[in-house]
Amino acid sequence: MALDRSDVERLAYLARIGLQDADIPAYAAKLSSIMGLIDKMQAVDTTGIQPLAHPLETTQRLRPDLVTESNQRDALQAIAPATEQGLYLVPRVIE
Amino acid sequence: MHEKSLADLSKALHSKAISSVELTELYLQRIQQLDGVTNSFITVTPELALEQAHAADQRLANGSAGPLTGIPLAHKDLFCTKGVRTSCGSKMLDNFIAPYESTVTQRFLDAGAVSLGKTNMDEFAMGSSSESSFYGPVRNPWNPQRIPGGSSGGSAAAVAARLCVAATGTDTGGSIRQPAGFTGLTGIKPTYGRVSRWGMIAYASSLDQAGPMAHSAEDCALLLQAMAGFDDKDSTSVDQPVPDYSAELNQPLSGLRVGLPKEYFGAGLDSSIADTISAAVKQLQSLGAEIREISLPNAELAIPAYYVIASAEASSNLSRFDGVRFGYRCENPADLTDLYLRSRAEGFGDEVKRRIMVGTYALSAGYYDAYYLQAQKIRRLIKNDFMAAYEQVDVILSPTSPTPAFPIGEKIDDPVSLYLTDIYTITANLAGVPGIALPAGFADGLPVGMQLLGPYFSEPRLLNIAHQYQQATDWHTRAPAGY
């Protein structure tokens, strides 16, 4: 399926990627060609076929609900763009 | 020394013919002298490497050393390495100093191996040519105008240029096997779940698997031995005993049933590759293998299904890069939405953005059944093809790629043509089966890779076949001119 400008704008916003206006036509062209490749799947009749999510078809392992990690807030916040008093800072959300 | 295999260097270290410090200094010097052309490293860590080499020499002296102790390796820059930048080839993580160690690299540390640094790669492992890195393209040591393959192209180029003894890679759609093929190396993608994914920056979690890249199957067996095994921290890690990967290397191949999928020897396969692989098949026959034609009828659907599943998983995995907790943040965001939009627009490269958007599309309301669910159903058809084939044969043989390494720049502006280069490797990831790539000769002066795929957990058999082939041939010992 071919994607037009509004499709690309919608997808970019859903994915929270702020594309430059001038780049949108190139994205539309390349995404359309990728979707053209992907659409070859649609010709296949998969009625009755069960989807395969995990190659070995195992289920997610569970572990006892116990604390296994120690507090590493300082180490983890040392690589954050902006923190204050142990909190991550972002632009004001609530006025 | 740098022309020796890992197995031989291990003997030299144990016999005290050379120390790990001397060996590490030799490789650090080679990186400094030669990596300007190949651009195979993003980060070199000389001080850390020498510190590890000193510790290795102590273990070698006090008798607590194993086969990898003191061996200088390099790691693909998506394995988190505590205290060392882990960039994933992206501007998004250019400033990211990993706060913890991945299971794979921790296991190599425990084994006493030395890490020389982190290797270049396609951004977030999304690519087949190692051209999409924020740190510039990697060049193939066999011809610097050519790509080394991808996404583990930095690891491939570094090992091929003898800038390290061996390296780690990861393989989501062929990213170990295809670059190994393009650079004359041996590389194995294990069964899904065999090697822990913990601390590997995720691309497509149901497909990603780490493995070693080296000069021979014998070396890969030693490396995989350290990497494989259950890990409580990876929820898809397989809890099964790890066999001795070196134990079966010397088994004869008589009676081995090798299948050639007719879909992999048809249109699109370069005749120089077909001829080289045909000679390799004859060599295996002379070693006792029986050759049969088989069919993987749904093989041509693998690329479309892969680009839905991988992109969908990537769009979810990469949502964590939001400019808040770590990684790149844009300057002066106006509000929170602007912070997300611009941090991700400025931090990610074009191919990563495209795949996130394809995945977002495939998962968006109203399209899920037509894309993601349909791709998962095709995934089952592809797995079924393999299971049927393994009723008739022990392993499946093909080229790793339809052409030799292509020129830098040739396909980078045409994503679909680049995607199609992974035609022979991508099925194994969808089915989760293991595969090994090994050098089978040359075409136009460039290495040609052969791929062997086996049933789940057949790594010992794949290594055995590759080793027997390498006892009868010397392609894997060839080095590019100047290295």
Image (cartoon, coloured by chain):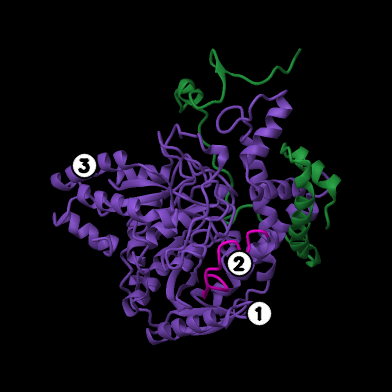
Per the model, the C-alpha gap separating discs 1 and 3 is 54 Å
List the residue tagged with mark 1. Answer: B267
Judged by its main secondary structure, the magenta piece is loop
Q: Quadrant of residue B268?
A: bottom right
Per the model, the C-alpha gap separating discs 1 and 2 is 13 Å
List the residue tagged with mark 3. Answer: B54
Chain of the residue under label 1:
B
Using a 10 Å C-alpha cutoff, classify the residue at mark 3 as few (fewer than 14 neighbours), some (14 to 19) or many (20 or more).
some
List the residue tagged with mark 2. Answer: B421
Tag 3 near tag 2, CB within 8 Å: no
Residue B418 on the magenta segment: no
Using a 10 Å C-alpha cutoff, classify the residue at mark 2 as few (fewer than 14 neighbours), some (14 to 19) or many (20 or more).
many
Helix, strand, or loop for circle 1?
loop
Helix, strand, or loop for circle 3?
helix
Q: Give the range drawn in magenta.
A: B397-413
Q: In this view, does B259 lie above or below B39?
A: below
Label located before the other in sequence (3 or 2): 3
Chain of the residue under label 2:
B
Q: Quick one: A69 or A92, which is closer to the camera?
A: A92
Residue at 52%, 38% in the rendered image: B94
Q: In this view, does B357 lie above or below B99?
A: below
Residue at 39%, 63% in the rendered image: B160
